[in-house]
Image (spheres, rainbow, N blue to C red):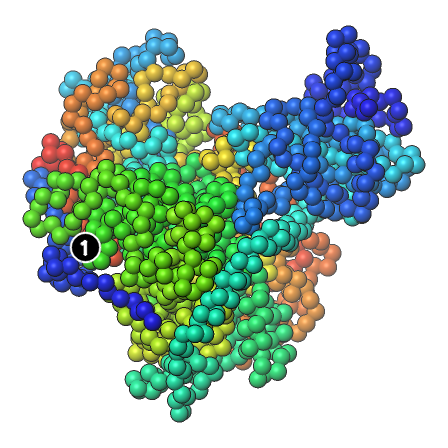
Amino acid sequence: MRLPYCFLSFPYSVSFHRRSGVLWLLLLGMLSGLPLSQAERISEEQKPKLTVAPSAESLETAPDDAVDVQLYEGIPAERNWKFSPSKAARRYQIPQFAIKDLPKKYDANGMIVERTPPFLLEARSRVDLPPGKYELVIRSLNSSRFYMDDELLSETPFMNLNSSAHNPHHEVGKFDPDFLSRPAAHFEERVTIEIKNQKPVFTLYMIVGNKGRRAEVGELMVAIAPLGKNFRFLSPTESQPFTDGAWVKIIEQERKLRLTLDQRARKHRTRKDTEYWQARHQAIREWLQSQPSVKVPAATAGLPANNAIDHFLNATIKSEEVQPTQTLDDLAFLRKLALDTIGLVPSEAEIKRFLQDPPAKRRNLAIERYLKHPGWADHWVGYWQDVLAENPGMLKPTLNNTGPFRHFLYESFLDRKPFDRFVTELIMMEGSPYYGGSAGFGLATENDVPMAAKAHVLGTAFLAVEMKCARCHDAPYHDVKQADLFSLAALLKRGPQPVPASSSIPADTLSNRDMIVQVTLQPGSKVQPNWPFEQFIQPESSEEISSELSLQNLDNPEDTRQQLALMLTSPLNQRFSQVIVNRVWHRYFGRGIVEPIADWELSEPSHPELLDYLVREFQMSGYDLEHLARLVFQSEAYQRQASSDSKLTATFAAPTRRTMQAEQLLDSLFTAVGKTFDTEELNLDQDGRQKTELFLDLGTPRRAWGLVATSNDRDRPSLSLPKAQSLVDLLQAYGWRQSRPDPITVRETNPTPLQPMALAYGAAPNRVLDLSDQAEITDLCLEEQPLEQLVDRIFQRFLTRPATEEERSLFCDLLEEGYEDRIHSSAKAHPVKLFRSGTTWATHFDEKATQEVADYEDRVLQGDPPTARLNADWRARVEDMLWVLSNTPEFLFLP
Amino acid sequence: MHRPTRRHFLHSASAAALAAPLGLSANMQNPLFAKEAASQVALGKAEHCIFLWLGGGVSQIDTWDPKRVTKDGLKDPGSAYPAIETAIQGEKICEHLSRTAPLLDRAAILRTVHHNAKDEHTAATNQMHTGRPVSGTITYPSLGSVVSHLRGSAGEGVPNYVLMAYPAPSRGPGFLGAKDGFVYLTETESGPKSLTRPQRVSDLQQARRLEMLHQMSKSYQQRHPADRQIENYLEASRQGFRLAGPEFMQAFQLDREPASLRESYGDEFGQRCLMARRLVERGVRFVEVTFNLNFVNGTGWDTHREGHHNQHLLIQSFDQAFSTLIQDLEEKQILDKTLIVMSSEFGRPASFDNAGGRGHQAQAFSVVLAGGGLRTGQVIGQTDELSRNIVSRPVSVPDLFSTIYATLGIPPEEELYDVERPVPVTDRGHPIAELLG
């Protein structure tokens, strides 16, 4: 039997340093042989001891080439270690004892679900250390135990759960180039060990989260140092220094690892689902083959055509007698393509690769590369956040807020989910509402009829039926009654949907004779679940196609959400496919075949046969957006120069002139300068004391879509996130919405004077342009090369083309002076310095919090620290050049 | 194949009515909703509004609606401080508002404002900025955006709406769109965001940048002749740089004011009020000024627990700024055309929490209006002996908003347009007739 506190077979001397801790005194008491009482001793012997400690088997199987992590769920909610974990729910391996975030948990539909806190995390590894004395540092947010073989070396206490905002400010460590700065609210323990000739197994346990609170891992880690030497992260293989810089790298490696692990997990979990959809799409293909196909017109003389799209368009271009614009040159095409697929300007490497391909093939090769790029998912998220009104609130959300189903969106597009499957999963509203499942779509805080709000969203998004007015009365200009919206809401609600008085118009308003608004549903009445749009599809009709599309064959035929999903996504519901095809078309041409995009009540398609053709292509491809995008990108029509002339754009003789969307602009700035997206962690509960439904952790985004309203409606300086706010300011100026209570498809893009100024003088863009040691352009400037080449390369990064003669001389003139002596060879890159804040929701009323954030805000306003490796005056002139290139309209407007 | 169809589009009953409004432009009358009979109150003539936002929830019983003083500040409910006489006969306010008290004839206290938004700052703040509960189908514009939209510009080369606060969604233009948004700053030192050049960029550098940008833009424009969108953007850019130029930026330079005046405005909140006056003088329609000096007592106006202990310092600081603002506007002869509003998301109860602070109370709280050509020197509405419940003359949030609009010459029945959908400026509010001529 193992006795965790028995140190009889003590192979090495252990001494303990401690910062604080009654627990340690207790432990020491035990070490020094304080006797247990008689009663305690008996119960100790009679009951099998429940505790958490490495078993003999665990010690034997611990890997010596990685740290093995296992997660045990379903542990008792009491805050103690009196339990024995059973089977691990998840297992994976990492390079060192250092964890920031965990891989996600998924259900059988690949939907993100919550790991109910508390759960146990175990990390173990056999580490070969040269003999000698070592000091270890253990950091944990909540209670942890750290073992060397079967010896308990350290234990951290259970975290404070006082969630009030009146707690004292957390102390955080100061910056030290050789010792990782300390985050808020973490416990830190130090122990000294002596290694003789054994290869010990280290095991670290942590109890993550607390019942009803957010499951916050914090920063869990162990570092080790031979006495008197610098600490490094404890690892069987890698030896990363215990510094801010290394920790930033480790977090990034972990993020990449989690992406892979999560994707693999989803693939594995959804095998059965995938089979169903494959069979369904096969059946649809067979059915379509029995239907008449759409005839593609013959080529039009004198007008170039790359594919069927051009055949359809050229016919009208000819008959309308308009002159199409010129075909874009190769690099302009590449720029437009990259922005439309991955939302970024092309990198130097991408440009180089493109130019190496044979001219005749390079466009199509580039299309394939970008379609397969993971950035494809990033670029779609922002779009659907608008259309589906994704509206998470970080802090006590009460403004018609949803959950952060951005993660569901991102993963759906990353996994290239067929679109009908994506919509079905959205409508099912499953998984975790607060951690990113589609259940988050189902939330609408403080909304009197959440499901009516969702029905409205689905109507505009997937049927182009605008039911905004029908929320409270029959729509006067639309053929929609309030009952239609509410019957759709009832399908989502899985039962009768009552109409509250707050969703109606007061009777006294209606008495007026001039009133053309009608209320045919009385407040208090209940609307039954019912498919209201029989003009699009009859409920039973899909079963003609195949059994996969039969209402009777749903997992649960009684489930009205499943019924609704089927009715929406059935191939017989042509309207659904038409709307999606039109959305994709609009996105790439800046104008729809049907306008407006989200409301077709009074609209007719400009090119009905083309729409039919694309619908069939979409359905044949298995509802694949990528396929539609490929057809568009390959067409000559897409590859022509844009125009603002409506005579040209109405016939698609030219694509409509577009500017970058807000996210493209911000992400492209970071890409052009070569910096990592930089913001504070979007989480006001870093000490994990708050309730899950009141505070969201939106993490540290890597792309603009990951941002969120900074939510400082309270005007509390201590709650401000200055970097995030400055990014939000830029995005908002260019049409992004920090609050998305209602769905929109087309953002407002008319420029106000503040729009160009947000780019010219805004804190965020100027910070991005600062040549710090973390910018690729800084490295570019340090390379030995002719000045002309440097100018051309910077041009490529910003404008995807070399400079013209005139431009080259303009910028060479600017940079020539001091170019030869620009490098300070003795200077070193500044070490990476993390911003550590002791301010969380739980401490933000402390005056130190206000002071800390105010100081930080000042520092942020000063910009990123400039590199010392370049002459300051010359560096400032390069920054001038970057400013000019990012503020010229050529950067913003797509070719 | 199916086409987008118009299923029996025109219902017979509404067909005739439908035909006309569809083509209406946004600013034309629309018979969609029955309008209430035109309001009986005369519209005010105020041109500007300074909206003082005391976020957190001002304790009305400790400020504008004093009641009996608590014996122990813990178990015995009541005001925390004694009350003093004011320029309005028979009406008292808290002793820490001693500078405002003799000027109260220039103001009106609304003691019965109330709402039933969720007991949460964000929801209540949203309601007290938009005048409505949150909706999932439409994003309502804030007061400042509505005023900007309907009253337009009052001066050359200045924005309509300036915000000195964090730019939360509740303060935004909602469906009105970016043109009715705000220019914002969070404190008076570092200037308005996006209009203030980063300090690390020197004048020389900026001149160099603009010269090169001009060349690049010109050549881009030449390569894309007569492109309307590019022209619009470049025009917006020219306007933007003008806005960021010295003329308007001077409004933010408080050191151009006499030192004695700056001193009498007091701390950072006072300086913001002074800046608001400078902005109004230059033609800015609407200025929201937040009082968020939370370091004074920890919690700002959200005086739970220990936050209550230094509440009197907040009140004194407000008193100093508010009284100076009234006098300064009067002296500059712009008080009559400038409506000052002091508002908050809710009030606080007479009873105390277990640390001697106060919770939230939305069923009765005070808002103060001053200047604006109103019939000031009045108290509107009465609460019970502990300011818990309304006794007479309740003022709903829509009533409050329509009063503010009416003071600024905006008819309460005015409609805004979310594309073609008409939205009345308030949710059937009635202006307080006693205040308007």
Image spot of residue A795 (x, y percent): 55, 71
Image spot of residue A287 (x, y percent): 44, 70
Using the image as rendered, state which of residue A891 and residue B104 is in the foreground. A891
Say above or below: B261 vs A831: above
Using the image as rendered, state which of residue B110 and residue A659 is in the foreground. A659
Write down the quadrant of residue A292 in the picture: bottom left
- The residue sitting at the bottom extreme is A301
- Is any part of residue A38 visible from this angle? yes
The structure residue drawn at horizontal position 31% and vertical position 41%, both measured from the top left corner, is: A496
The structure residue drawn at horizontal position 32% and vertical position 62%, both measured from the top left corner, is: A536
- Is any part of residue A587 visible from this angle? no
Image spot of residue A891 (x, y percent): 47, 68
Say above or below: A296 vs B293: below
Image spot of residue B298 (x, y percent): 45, 27
Provide the chain ID for the residue under circle 1.
A
Q: Secondary structure at mark 1?
A: loop
Say above or below: A470 vs A28: below
Using the image as rendered, state which of residue A701 and residue A113 is in the foreground. A113
- Reading the image, the residue beneath label 1 is A476
Q: Amino acid at mark 1?
A: Pro
Write down the quadrant of residue A275 in the picture: bottom right
Q: Pick the quarter of the image with the N terminus of chain B.
A: bottom left
- The residue sitting at the right extreme is A197
The structure residue drawn at horizontal position 69% and vertical position 43%, both measured from the top left corner, is: A91
